[in-house]
Every structure is written in C-alpha cells, then in structure tokens.
Image: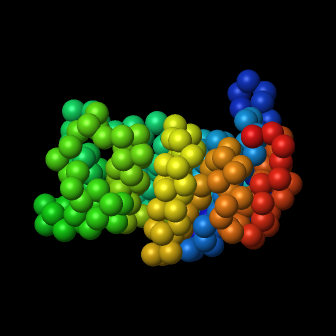
Amino acid sequence: MIRLLDIQKTYDNGTKALKGVTLNIEDGEFVFLVGPSGSGKSTIIKLITGEEHPNAGRIMVNGYNLNSIHPRQIPYMRRTLGVIFQDFRLIDKKTVGENLEFAMRAVGASTREIRKRIPYVLDLVDLSQKEDRYPSQLSGGEQQRVAIARALVNNPDMIIADEPTGNLDPQRSLEIMTLLEKINELGTTMLVVTHAKELVNRFTKRVIAIENGRIFSDETGGYYKHEEI
C-alpha cells in the first residue's frame, strides 16, 4: 500500500519536481505511471524507495511512515519493494542463479530458502533452463526476465518497474508486460513507469498521468492520451 499526500519536492538546484502530488496505490493493484520526460515520474519512484525525501507532504510505503522512519528501518522497508531497471543491472560475472542467490544472501536468506525459491521464480519467468548461463549468453528479453526474477526472489509486496521495456523491441516488450501482468495476478502489487504509450494502451489498467509535477489524470482502464512520449 502506497500513500502520497500533497507531496512537494524541490531539488537543491531550484527544480520544482512535484507540486502537490496525492495518490494512493492499494495492495494488489496494477498501475501505470506515465508522462513526458521531466514530469516527475522518477522523483516519485525515488521518494517511494526512500532515496529522496519530500519538502512537504506525507508518504506511507507498505506500513512504513517515511516522514519519521529511522534510518535503520529503511533497509527493511526496501525489502518490501522489488525494483526492475531499464538497464537490467545484472552482475556479469555471476550466472543467472548466482545473481538471484546474491540478492537473497543480501537479506539473510538461508541456503534452504535459496534452494527452494530460486527454481520457483525462474520457472515463473520461463528461465528454468538458463540458471547456469551468464548474462552475456542471454538475449535482452531474457536478461530483463532475470531482472524481474531478481526483483521477485525475496517475495516483495510491490514491484516497481522503471521503464522495463525501454531497451527491448515491441514483441519482447509485450512479452515482458504480459509477464508483469501475470505476476500481479499472483498477488504482487505492480507500479510500472513507462513512456511506452502503445503498450499502456494495450492493457486495461489504471493509468496515472503526470505532467509538470502535477497529476492531471488518474483513470482505471484509461488510456495514455498525451501526445508527447
């Protein structure tokens, strides 16, 4: 569950990134966050993950009050989130399985948990036969599936996908978005930040559109109508 209430964010250089943003994302929702470059999308993600802090307003993330959270609690809050990046950010010298194991070891998972969880997640993203491959041996679409598996492997409440199809062709992009939809149907809340207007319009989901630091549209089953992408 995400709550942003009247969020104001101005960076040190004077850029007013957010100008009174209020939005709620309930458990189990699938939400697209869309808007032109510089609209405030990335700032919202940084606020949700605790990378940035608002100048005014209140933020709740999966039961954590980010306005008063103790620094020691931030890693625990972040464990409730899985983040998928456009550039994959896989460790080149580790195999697919080792990349996932590394993510699980980082949060203190036991060897038993690792042996049980990794095969399940790889099967979910249709990479069961690629556990011993290195990222360089995979296609771009397969590398993104590994990144999705890594985001899932610690069983987060919510996944944030930041331009997850930005480096993929249209067919691979559709496959990745369909996979994210499947993961959402299994119970994981999904927030997808994207410029891909055509993809957004193929899925009947909630679409939050932001421009110049303000939300100007929030429609369930809506379309991304803005001309600039």
Q: Can residue 135 be seen by looking at this rendering? A: yes
Residue 45 versus residue 219: which sits nearer the camera? 219
Which residue occupies 71% across, 58% down? 201
- Quarter that holds the C terminus: top right
Farthest residue toward the top?
A: 13
Residue 93 versus residue 124: which sits nearer the camera? 124
Residue 46 versus residue 221: which sits nearer the camera? 221
Quarter-of-image position of residue 109: bottom left
Q: Is residue 108 above or below residue 95?
A: below
What color scheme is it? Answer: rainbow
Seen in the image, is 146 located left or right of residue 199?
A: left
Which residue occupies 64% across, 42% down? 42
Count of numbered tags: 0
Q: x%, y% of residue 204?
A: 69, 69
- Quarter that holds the N terminus: bottom right
Q: x%, y% of residue 124?
A: 34, 66
Q: Can residue 64 be seen by looking at this rendering? A: no
Q: x%, y% of residue 117?
A: 24, 66
Which residue occupies 24% across, 47% down? 96
Q: Is residue 164 above or below residue 117?
A: above
Farthest residue toward the front?
A: 171
Q: x%, y% of residue 183?
A: 46, 68
Quarter-of-image position of residue 112: bottom left
Quarter-of-image position of residue 59: bottom right
Farthest residue toward the left?
A: 111
Seen in the image, is 111 located left or right of residue 157?
A: left
Which residue occupies 33% across, 60% down? 126
